[in-house]
Image (spheres, coloured by chain):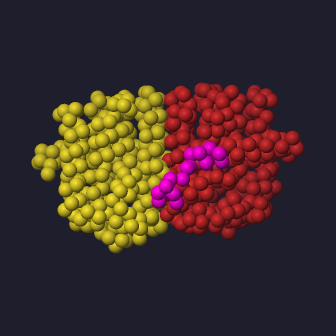
Chain colours: A yellow, B red
Amino acid sequence: MPTAIESDIVAEGLLRVQEEVDSLFDAFLSVPEDSRSRLVEAMRYAAIDGGKRIRPLLLVSTAELFGVGRDYAMRAGCAVEAIHVYSLIHDDMPCMDDDALRHGRPTVHLKFDEATAVLAGDALHAMAFEILADPAMSGDPFVRAQLVECLARASGMNGMAGGQMMDMMAEGEEYDLHTITRLQQLKTGALLAASVEMGAILGHVPPEGRGHLRNYARDIGLAFQIADDLLDCEGDEDKAGKALRKDEDQGKATFVSLMGADKAREQANALVEQAIGHLAIYGDEARMLCALARYVVERDR
Amino acid sequence: MPTAIESDIVAEGLLRVQEEVDSLFDAFLSVPEDSRSRLVEAMRYAAIDGGKRIRPLLLVSTAELFGVGRDYAMRAGCAVEAIHVYSLIHDDMPCMDDDALRHGRPTVHLKFDEATAVLAGDALHAMAFEILADPAMSGDPFVRAQLVECLARASGMNGMAGGQMMDMMAEGEEYDLHTITRLQQLKTGALLAASVEMGAILGHVPPEGRGHLRNYARDIGLAFQIADDLLDCEGDEDKAGKALRKDEDQGKATFVSLMGADKAREQANALVEQAIGHLAIYGDEARMLCALARYVVERDR
């Protein structure tokens, strides 16, 4: 269990990041005075005032370990969040997960229409890379190029989109624990890991110095998904702001269906302790990342 | 009219680029041995052996003006083409243009399914930026970051996706010539212009030295779209490999509906001559770009 102080740290951290992300999205997404306004309104609807912003908090907290200016880290955090938001818009569509609610509000294709949802997702996708490649992101073009490479790899066929495909194919398939783990590492883990990695890139940490952070990210990624599966089984739809118990209805194997809820919870907690262990070398500086690790398995939405 | 020699130059140029693009896509898109294979098969189906490859030819021909190695230019050309292909996949979907044929073959959502079409588009979108940010693209990270910035800007809400939104809103609207021009500059022109600009970026041409090329790109972008509108009115569906006469059915204003076919053709030809004029300072070195300008208005698909 996270201590009360740890919960406070994360709650404060998320609140601050939520405000900063919203303010940046507001600046990036000014509504044009032509018929593109509908597109940008849809992007704003999906991107602003929604979501926990765990990925930006992971990114800025990692960047902070290496003394990166917060404004720079927040821009990169916004880029990761733009990818996350675009993926939710597309995943919610009728041909994908067919969800009506997201963050307690109608999904984009219901609030607007399906064509607008496709385009709003696509435009947020492009925006993420525009943010990262902009000289305002970092004075060092090598950092900008590395950020783009890291996020693009984590989003595409060998990352999030690949994991989403495996998930679409899961219905009726008998995936084992190994395959479920791989699926989740791609679908959710890749973007969480990219958030940490991008913090390290901004901190000019060379690839060979990112081992502990990568191990931390891998462990919390898996713990995050086990917690998601537990939430899907046992959670409160009102708190979650979205439909739950979908995996069971669709006959998809999850960590919970394969391991049982008790074993799954135990595993998630073990992963969190392991994740925190990887950060020992950073000492007290890594307080937020440690608290975040506990938060990902204890959240109720 | 292009001379016979010019037509040969373009035909040869396109043929060569088609082979090179296909071979690069084949290398980038190796099929994994898990259930992501369906995703990558869909990406290959859409990306390989289809399309005229005008954008990559524009890019390599511009890069050639500045002595850029062809392998580098082709990689960037592949990235632009990946964006073009992803946009076709999404545009063809039932909620967008609802097209059944593309390059004479069933569209991706019919050959596979809608969810796979969404994800294949998304994964190609990410791949474009992964290609550009990869150190194999250019030894100069500033070049890589600039390429990403240019392509992301041309693809998003202030480029292709924005133009597509304006196009979706056009049904039943009374767009005037000014608005149609703006729409087409975004929807088609931005990516054509980015192809030229990226060639210049690879050639280390500073922004202030790109004026003639930008003017050329703007003119052929517009000529390209007028030619498309003429093709939509007068073309042969078998040659085009896709459904035609859709604009009229949907009551959308086009250059042809607003200006009449004769005036539109005249305008396209004038734009082509103007485009060629902008390249005078490059002399005979710009032979391919000049021939391409004539080709865009004379093509039959």
Magenta region: B22-38
Residue that lies at the very extreme toward the left in this rendered image: A4
Inspect the magenta stretch and tell me whether residue B27 lies in it.
Answer: yes
Residue sitting at the far bottom:
A249
Quarter of image, res B284? top right
**Magenta span includes A221:** no
- In this view, the residue in front, B267 or A209, is A209
- Residue B138 is left or right of residue A189, and the answer is right
Residue B139 percent location from the top left of the image: 54, 28
How far across and down, in percent of the image, does residue A143 sit?
A: 43, 31
Residue at (28, 42) in percent of width and height: A216
Vertical arrangement, residue B147 with respect to residue A234, above or below: above
| Up/down of A154 relative to A284, above or below | below
The answer to whether residue A117 is visible is yes
Q: Position of residue B76 (x, y in %)?
A: 60, 39
Quarter of the image holding residue A255? bottom left
For the C terminus of chain A, the quadrant is: bottom left
